[in-house]
Image (cartoon, grey):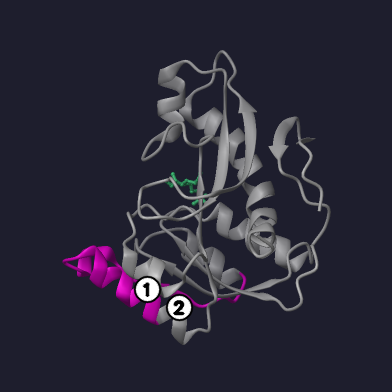
Amino acid sequence: MNYQLSTINNALVSPTISTNLQLDKPLQLGVMASGSGTNFESIANAIAKKELNAQVKVLIYNNPNAKVKSRAEKWQIPAILIDHRDYKKREALDRQIVNTFKEYGVEWVIMAGWMRIVTQVLLDGFPDRVINIHPSILPSFKGIRAIEQALAAGVKITGCTVHKVSLAVDSGEIIMQAAVPILPNDTPDTLHARVQVQEHLILPQAIALAAQM
Ligand code: GAR
């Protein structure tokens, strides 16, 4: 494994890994997403291209109109709506999520644009195996609107982080990060688009890396 910094598409990425690592058997993934699902798609693509030895067993999404649903259908991956509005407590929502993932044989949980705070119920269901992607170089700009936070702070570099999930929001062990320069005329949309290019590169790699940690 190569732990050097490297550049991919002009972004500084750390650490990098050479190939699909030596995963003995495919990782059994469950993905959680709330919106567009481009990160979900990056995982499906990496698997199809044999860059990630894994299977997405099921997608859980929480917004009925989320575009990620049609992406899952395209890949013939089961998509289950678990709408947070149907649950009074976060723990009850997470219990349903854990039960659904267990039914589908999920072993690793990937939060790919999941816009809800998770509880110990989810973490206990998959100890040390819940992974999140966040659009900043953590520990900077935790929480919502991380892209806007970076622009407002006037920093010149931001990026994205893949990390293990802990109870404190956006605070678990960092697996992989990529840096993205902020350009003078960037808007939230233009900056987010460049950050997403890097997200799509590092998320599949970080999943493989997490399985080796
Ligand atoms: C991604 O940029 C991800 O980093 C962010 O939501 C976007 C989802 O995009 N996640 C968070 O902000 C979590 N706090 P996608 O639906 O196209 O994958």
Q: Quadrant of residue 123?
A: bottom left
Q: Percent x, y for residue 182?
A: 58, 21
Q: Is mark 2 on a helix, strand or loop?
A: helix
Q: In which quarter of the image is residue 185?
A: top right
What residue sits 46% from the left and 52% below the top? 113
Residue type at mark 1? Ile
Residue 78 colored in magenta in the image: yes
Instruction: Locate the C terminus by quadrant.
Output: bottom right
> Is the residue marked by circle 1 packed among few (<14), some (14-19), or many (20+) residues within 10 Å?
many
Tell me if label 1 and label 2 are in contact, CB under 8 Å. Answer: yes
- Stretch in magenta: 75-99
Q: Could you tell whether 22 is left or right of 104 in the image?
A: right
Q: Percent x, y for residue 54?
A: 68, 72
Q: Name the residue under label 2.
A: 101
In the displayed structure, 194 sits above or below 26; it is: above
What residue sits 77% from the left and 44% below the top? 3
Q: Percent x, y for residue 69?
A: 47, 66
Q: Can residue 44 be seen in this view?
A: yes
> Is the residue marked by circle 2 packed among few (<14), some (14-19), or many (20+) residues within 10 Å?
many
Residue 97: mark: 1
In the displayed structure, 88 sits above or below 5; it is: below
> Which residue is at the front of the view, 46 or 211?
211
Residue at the far left: name it. Answer: 88
Residue 112: mark: none
Q: Could you tell whether 132 is left or right of 5 in the image?
A: left
Residue type at mark 2? Phe
Residue at the far bottom: name it. Answer: 103
Q: Is residue 8 visible?
A: no
> Which residue is at the front of the view, 23 or 104?
23
What residue sits 68% from the left and 58% below the top? 209
Residue 131 colored in magenta in the image: no
